[in-house]
Image (cartoon, rainbow, N blue to C red):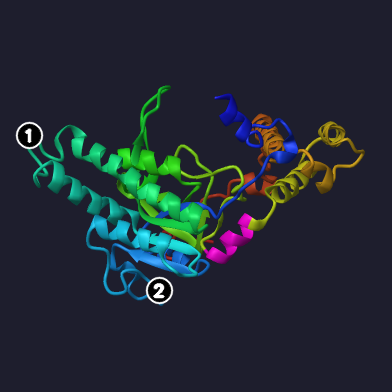
């Protein structure tokens, strides 16, 4: 044990100069509704090679494997990945369109091999979620192959997925639904833990209530965005080293530009935008925190992403509380009516003839 440790002394050294930072291209899961633009995003990446399991990408001008049609079995998907690992090529991005299709192919293989092709009934794929659990376990083989492709060939991995709703357990209240890829829960648990980034591609939607308690949704503008910040209503994430300001436009160029930026730049700019809304005492506290008389972007950036995020959350919370506690504007007193308007006009006498037949004077 001692000899082995001494041979790897550099790996277990307390010297900080021996620490290496290896940041490979991200492993991205991008999910969204049909037609939102996921495939266009994928084929716009750097030197992409498409691995299709559906016909949605047949009209794109992008190299693909297989060169004709789509992957028809789970084994074909694995075969394509190993071709990219061992083959002679200069592709930089592997795009699977879609990972839902890969799961379906994997489930078909599992059902045939382990459940004699039975999808329902006793001792079938669907009984007690046994098939879904077996599919998730087999999915680890796929991710191991993608991991090798990512590490050995340093390729970016983009897994496109259709959007769905997934029930989320809530220990403090009622369970709720959230947006996530339309995959089996067991498969998604394995995949979401493996990837570096999860992006939700969507349009901003405004919902209005109509008569009869019905609701109507309409898109706000034509722009589509990718959200990388997880929240109760959606699954999303960006691991350390892959942070970026969220949301970004659903465009690979905009995504890459945001990924190349220092996240502290955007956070510092956000703080500088919020400071004029704060009190003089709050400004002085921020300046003291920066160690300067005046709050500057350079001073803020030295604090790092985590501390800047905490500061923004505190500022936003304080502003929200001030808005909530603000007194509503006093109502204007009703205008008094003029004496002329208050004076009641006499009712006109009814027209008619008097006893002499003449009109009344």
The chief SS type of the magenta part is helix
Q: Position of residue 302 (x, y in %)?
A: 79, 41
* 193 vs 77, nearest the viewer: 77
Q: Residue furthest front?
A: 3
Instruction: Report the disc number at residue 355.
Output: none
Q: Quadrant of the C terminus?
A: bottom right
Q: Position of residue 198 (x, y in %)?
A: 47, 48
**Which residue is denoted by mark 1 in the rendering?**
122
**Which residue is denoted by mark 2 in the rendering?**
63
Looking at the image, residue 250 sits to the left or right of residue 181; the answer is right
Looking at marks 2 and 1 on the same chain, the residue that comes earlier in the sequence is marked by: 2
* 264 vs 76, nearest the viewer: 76
Looking at the image, residue 73 sits to the left or right of residue 314; the answer is left
- In terms of image quadrants, where is residue 11? top right
Q: Position of residue 60 (x, y in %)?
A: 39, 75
Looking at the image, residue 176 sits to the left or right of residue 13; the answer is left
Q: Is residue 19 above or below residue 216?
A: above
Q: Is residue 159 above or below residue 311?
A: below
Say if residue 202 shows up in the picture: no
Distance from Cα at disc 2 to Cα at disc 1: 44 Å
The span picked out in magenta is 251-259
Q: Is residue 249 above or below residue 9?
A: below
Magenta stretch: includes residue 207: no
Say if residue 325 shows up in the picture: yes
Closer to the observer: label 2 or label 1? 2
Circles 2 and 1: CB distance less than 8 Å? no
* 344 vs 128, nearest the viewer: 128
Magenta stretch: includes residue 252: yes
- In terms of image quadrants, where is residue 114? top left
Q: Residue furthest right?
A: 293
Q: Which residue is located at x 31 percent, y 60 percent?
A: 79
């Amino acid at each position: 044990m001692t000899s082995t440790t001494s041979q790897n002394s550099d790996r277990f050294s307390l010297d900080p100069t021996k620490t290496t930072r290896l940041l490979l291209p991200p492993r991205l899961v991008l999910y969204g509704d049909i037609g939102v633009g996921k495939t266009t995003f994928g084929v716009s990446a750097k030197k992409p090679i498409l691995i299709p399991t559906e016909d949605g990408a047949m009209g794109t001008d992008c190299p693909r494997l297989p060169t004709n049609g789509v992957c028809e079995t789970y084994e074909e998907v694995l075969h394509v990945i190993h071709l990219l690992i061992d083959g002679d090529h200069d592709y930089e991005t592997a795009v699977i369109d879609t990972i839902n299709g890969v799961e379906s192919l994997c489930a078909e293989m599992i059902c045939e091999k382990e459940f004699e092709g039975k999808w329902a009934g006793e001792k079938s794929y669907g009984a007690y979620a046994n098939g879904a659990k077996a599919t998730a376990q087999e999915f680890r083989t796929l991710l191991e192959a993608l991991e090798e492709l990512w590490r050995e060939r340093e390729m970016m991995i983009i897994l496109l997925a259709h959007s769905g709703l997934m029930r989320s357990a809530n220990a403090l209240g009622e369970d709720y639904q959230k947006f996530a890829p339309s995959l089996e829960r067991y498969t998604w648990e394995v995949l979401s833990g493996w990837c570096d980034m999860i992006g939700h591609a969507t349009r901003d939607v405004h919902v209005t209530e109509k008569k009869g308690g019905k609701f109507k949704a309409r898109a706000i503008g034509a722009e589509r965005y990718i959200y990388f910040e997880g929240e109760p209503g959606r699954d999303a994430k960006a691991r350390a080293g892959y942070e970026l300001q969220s949301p970004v436009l659903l465009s690979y160029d905009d995504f890459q530009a945001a990924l190349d930026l220092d996240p502290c730049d955007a956070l510092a700019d956000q703080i500088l935008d919020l400071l004029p809304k704060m009190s003089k005492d709050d400004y002085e506290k921020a300046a003291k925190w920066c160690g300067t008389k005046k709050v500057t972007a350079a001073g803020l950036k030295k604090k790092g992403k985590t501390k800047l995020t905490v500061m923004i959350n505190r500022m936003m919370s304080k502003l929200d509380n001030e808005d909530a506690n603000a007194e509503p504007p006093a109502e204007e007193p009703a205008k008094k009516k003029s004496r002329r308007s208050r004076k009641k006009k006499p009712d006109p006498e009814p027209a008619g003839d008097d006893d002499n037949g003449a009109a009344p004077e």
